[in-house]
Image (spheres, rainbow, N blue to C red):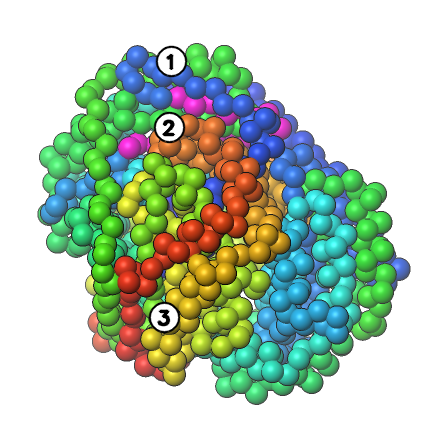
Amino acid sequence: MTAGPDGGSPGSAVNVASVTTAGAELTLRHPVERFALDNGLRVVLAPDRSVPVVAVSVFYDVGMRNEPEGRTGFAHLFEHMMFQGSAHVPKMEHARLVQAAGGTFNGSTHQDYTNYFEALPSEALERALFLEADRMVAPAITEENLRNQIDVVKEEIRVNVLNRPYGAFPWLQLPQIAFESFANTHDGYGSFVDLESSTVDDATDFFSRYYAPGNAVLCIGGDLDVAETERLVQRWFGPVEARAVPPVPPTGEPLSTTARSGVVEDALATAPAVAIGWRVPDPVGDFDTYLGTVLLAELLSEGDASRLERRLVHGDRIAIAQSSYVGLFGDPFDVRDATLLTTQVHHPAAVAPETVLSTVHEEIARIAADGVGAEELRRVQARTEAQLLRQADSVLGRTLAFAAAELIHGRAELAGEIAARLAAVTPEQVQTAARALDPGTAAVLELRATGGRS
Amino acid sequence: MTTQLDLSLVPPLGDPRPHPVPAAEETTLPNGLRVVVVPRPGVPLIELRLRVPFAAPTERGAGVHTARASVLSGAVLLGTAAHDQNAIAELLQGHGAELSVSTDPDRLLFATTLLPGGLSPVLGMLAELLTGAAYPADPVEGERDRLVERIVIARSQPGVIARTALAARRYGSHPYAVQLPDPDVVAEVRPPALRRLHHERVVPSGSSLVLVGDLDPRAAVDAVAAALAGWTERGDAVEAPPVPAELHASEVSLVDRPGAVQSNIRLGGPAPTRTDPDLAALRLANMVFGGYFSSRYVENIRENRGYSYSPRSSVDHQAAGSSFLVEADVATEVTGPALLETQYELGRMALAPVTEAELDAARRYVLGSMALSIATHAGLASTLSALVGAGLPADWLYDHQRDLAGVTIDEVQEASRRYLAPSALTTVVVGDADRVAGQLEALGPVGVDGEK
């Protein structure tokens, strides 16, 4: 769901362990400063002057789950509109002003938020603040820009979904089976009918409702002076007029009490696949229990030493590839309730999906019954810590993690504490998480490959 | 939009602060392995890259070599005399590591991140794999069969079909024409062939090891020397044979993909190598054309016409030759118009000068994004591994930055005339031939292939 030419694609390419953020030691090294402007904009500064790079990000509290019925894909389409120029910036000039300063930029639409960000040489900090403030005031929502970006978004959907095998698997298809509410089940990329019927008025209303400064977090990380940056933020964002802030709509829904399943056919795919989704504890309200589930996903699927890789791929040889992750796009710490732990398995046509399913359930039942050894969990925690640290090594990666933690959890500092929190998870917590993955309440999606073999 | 940019409103850029220059410590071990170690502030991690030259020895043998190399890259982790696959994976995982082993037409690459305390044990496991990978028969068979399935899945991806078709057209019988191994050839790979390939080709001579991150350089070099002293297999590094003059055809090669809702347009041709004095000018020409969002190509076919989501161009380096590449995935109904605009923008680069503003923007972006890309342990390690593997010194980066700073408008136009002219490029389109052949024929001759 990225707008720029250099962004990755979501969904089918979800990484198992793209857990964000920083280890315990980084909490000290990256102190977080926080303040709010009179217009309600929340500001987080995370200084670190080791390299002359600064990252600027604005997170708006509106995502795919906030879209109204009949406007599927609108949050993402609107993200594109934010790059079409603004009050004082003509079309294409946003990109030019960032890139000609030696910086990179992008934006992305998630379930619960939409973000915009730049990574630049630190001397370009004020320029980035000007650009973000200018479009927070008035993006160039015109008929011509809207029609152009509807075309671009349709090509994005063709590249990532319609013109390739497994394009919607499982991220657009499994939620329809796992959930009940429109917020959780609809296609966040959008139907072509909904996209094509979108109007300038829809975009203006959406901006007015969701893009108020009080509905946003501005997070700046890297090579910055706190006092000077606070002054610059006041200068550029202070004048943005306050507007009413919509309440965060509840996206949680009751736990299912039954097993559900569905089948899709993929005419471009040459091999079948199956995905299982289980509801997990509230990622915000029940954070400690949730951490056990996050580590369970790592223990199940991350690397050659993981339970499912050993059993499905190397032992029984009933899978070509497997992965497990928490959160629709694989980041467990930037989502609200309701959320899934998903296990997806690509398997040979000669293996029945029932065999794959029963073997996955058996492995989980084994953890539920026998627990996990302290030594096995310690290895999983070491690997998870290394991955968290790796993400935190980039100024941009760190800044986005602080911003997401502020928006979703109300505490940017949490991003720096997650490694330590995960390191404190006990084998009992992981066992408890496994007991909650009940085959009787799982949602199962079977993909049948009808593309034949070449 | 008629808004004009009032530059007086845009905050000026402050004074740039220089990037810290990483000090690389380079040594060559008695066994011939080159070792590059760079301490870097940042997170408490180390990034490891071991690069072994792994090109196909002959054009005729390229298909078999590629198949064996692909199986070897997975099978090398399946066990040694002392440890089975699980024990290897567990030991690495305990230090935050997971070894990824991959091949391309030039090299075999072992890569991992690790927690600093794990340096000696991870190097020890690496040495054990290099000197004692066992290729046990039964696990190898499983790995090989999975690889066959994965190749079949990869070949159903339109991007892979397009890349394969372009390489085949450009390189003919040269090994670079083989992008993915043939699954039927992979299915015939046996453990003895892997053991032989490993023995002959996984050798320290010509290989390079890069370590970047939270380390003491002296202690790290000592740890490498201690762990890898026993890696003494003799053999010569094999590099790819020189790329012959490309088999350039003037007709568009159309690969039929019936029912496709999009067409994948790909153009490719030669580009200056890393040591060619024209490289800096060509890189900047590439940026102005389609190398970033602020380019002519993106403005034309995305932001003005809405034909494509992510049109782009790039410069790619392989050991035996470099490439200039253009890619755009476009709606089926505008395939002809999109190729027309592609040719128009390439022709404009070749025939008319870029503006001073275009050149300055491209230059600042390239310098800025290079600095960003080496501002992490992982980014710096991968960059150094590619440079050292190409036989270049670590400070090539700084020479290249100096070259970029001096490029003139005339030099950009000369590079564009030689490398970006549509007549210098091979064109491949993957799409629904029934619906796009007529459109493409309006622009010139078209040859149609069935989907491979």
Cβ–Cβ below 8 Å for labels 2 and 1? Answer: no
Chain bearing mark 3: A
Is residue A59 shown in magenta? yes
> Residues at marks 1 and 3, common chain?
yes
Foreground: disc 2 or disc 1? 2
Residue receiving disc 3:
A357
Name which of mark 2 and mark 1 comes first in the sequence: 1
Quadrant in which residue A116 is drawn: top left
Residue receiving disc 2:
A410
- Give the percent coordinates (x, y) of residue A411: 41, 27
Chain bearing mark 1: A
Q: CA distance from mark 2 to mark 3?
A: 38 Å
SS class, disc 1: helix
Q: Residues within 10 Å of mark 2 (few under 14, many from 20)?
A: few
What's the magenta region? A43-61
Instruction: Please name the amino acid that badge 1 sits on.
Output: Gln
Cβ–Cβ below 8 Å for labels 2 and 3? Answer: no
> Residues at marks 2 and 3, common chain?
yes
